[in-house]
Amino acid sequence: MKSKTSEGDAAAYKILESSNHGFIVINPSGIVLHTSPYVQELLGYDDLPGRNIKILLEEPLRSLHDGFLQRFVQTGNTRISGKFGRDVLGLSKSGQRVHMFLFLNDATRDNGDMCIVGQVERYNMALFR
């Protein structure tokens, strides 16, 4: 599902597509607007845009996610943010758990709407030894 994108949004998405990092852009309702190719490779989804980000979560986080998202949109406060991030478990399309590190930031699209940009990387314990 493709959403309408402005020229500026399209340029930003093109930058994300050229990155070797994992980026997921969602709207305040949790609907995925765009993903980078690395996310597709990491999680096996080529059809995330238009779907709710919750499909990447196991219970109980899946059921709690709307509340987390609502709090973030209303207050700007999250337990996962910018430079600190958090290590999380995601679900691949095949149902496999994927250990990742997640950073979140909010941004404003060209049309003035808020979006949330998540950066995900495969968690590698070897980096912390």
Image (cartoon, rainbow, N blue to C red):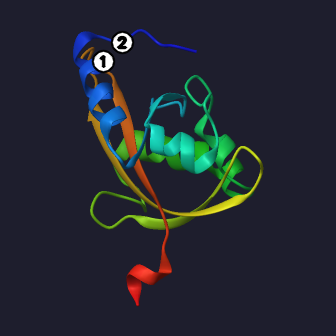
Task: Specify the amino acid type for callout 1.
Answer: Ala
Q: Which label belongs to residue 5?
A: 2
Q: Nearer the viewer, residue 60 or 125?
A: 125
Asked if residue 123 is positioned above or below residue 127 in the image, the reply reads above
Residue 36, image x and y in percent?
A: 43, 37
Determine which quarter of the picture holds residue 25: top left
Determine which quarter of the picture holds residue 41: top right
Q: Nearer the viewer, residue 125 or 50?
A: 125
Asked if residue 49 is positioned above or below residue 43 in the image, the reply reads above
Q: Which label belongs to residue 107?
A: none
Q: Which residue is under mark 1? A: 10
Instruction: Please give the name of the residue rendered at 32% of the width and 42% of the height, measured from the top-left corner.
Output: 19
**Element under label 1?**
helix
Residue 80, image x and y in percent?
A: 41, 60
Q: Is residue 40 left or right of residue 91?
A: left
Could you tell me how far apart the alpha carbons at marks 2 and 1 are, in whole angstroms?
6 Å
For mark 1, does the 10 Å Cα neighbourhood hold few (<14), some (14 to 19), or many (20 or more) residues? few
Instruction: Please give the name of the residue rendered at 40% of the width and 39% of the height, measured from the top-left corner.
Output: 73
Instruction: Please give the name of the residue rendered at 62% of the width and 33% of the height, measured from the top-left corner.
Output: 52
For mark 2, does the 10 Å Cα neighbourhood hold few (<14), some (14 to 19), or many (20 or more) residues? some
